[in-house]
Amino acid sequence: MAEKTKLGKLCKERMLEEVLGSFKLHPDFIITSYMGSSVSELESLRRGLKKTRSDYMVVKNSILKVAFEKMKLAEEVNKIESGMGISFSGDDIVATCKTVATFAKDHNKFKIKGAVIDGKPVTADKVKELANLPSRQVLLTRVVVGMKSPITGFVNILSGVLRKFVYCVDAIKTKKSMSA
């Protein structure tokens, strides 16, 4: 019997190490409740997240509580209930939020409980707001266009001044050739 408890404790320690390692690799993550969702539904979520270089892991509640306490995220411990899963974000947290929020919208039993972004706890409503933002690529394009616009305007103004100068010189040339 003592060997069984040692094995159970060792197993839980390994699970905790794995979860903490995932949190270290992916500091931005979304906390979800998956109770009532089928395995095939969660697999479709994982496939969707894989496109954004993100991952989804089902975590035992007791392990998750200890992990949050070790990470000094005591506020997040209150969100733990029933079956919990963590969506670890890849490069783009907005893309991860979009994928998880879309899945939650399509599957009523799947709930977003909150998130941790840049080391700070975030509410489920903020995750949904992030999901409504344009993608990172669209935002970067808007920034570049915004930076390019004044430069383009300046170039157009300069070309207009040059164009008027050329017209003026051409008019003087035409007038001199007519009078000569």
Image (tube, rainbow, N blue to C red):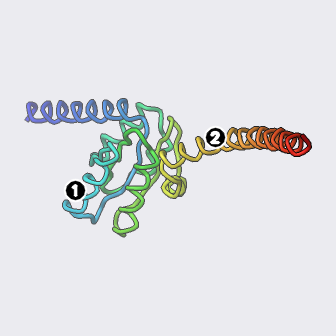
- Asked where in the image residue 99 lies, by quadrant, the reply is bottom left
**Horizontally, is 96 left or right of 49 in the view?**
right
Q: Position of residue 141 (x, y in %)?
A: 54, 45
Q: Which residue lies under the disc numbered 1?
A: 43
Q: Is residue 71 above or below residue 149?
A: above
The residue lying at 67 percent from left, 42 percent from top is 152
**Amino acid type at mark 2:** Lys
Q: Position of residue 41 (x, y in %)?
A: 24, 62
Residue 145 vs residue 115, the one in the foreground: 145
Q: Callout 2 environment at 10 Å: few (<14), some (14 to 19), or many (20+)?
A: few
Q: Secondary structure at mark 2?
A: helix
- Asked where in the image residue 64 lies, by quadrant, the reply is top left
Q: Which residue lies under the disc numbered 2?
A: 148
- Look at the image and tell me in which quarter the C terminus lies: top right
Q: Earlier in the sequence, mark 2 or mark 1?
A: 1
Kindly report the distance in space between the C-alpha atoms of the residues bearing marks 2 and 1. Answer: 43 Å
Residue 86 vs residue 89, the one in the foreground: 89
**Horizontally, is 151 left or right of 77 in the view?**
right
- Look at the image and tell me in which quarter the N terminus lies: top left
- Asked where in the image residue 159 lies, by quadrant, the reply is top right
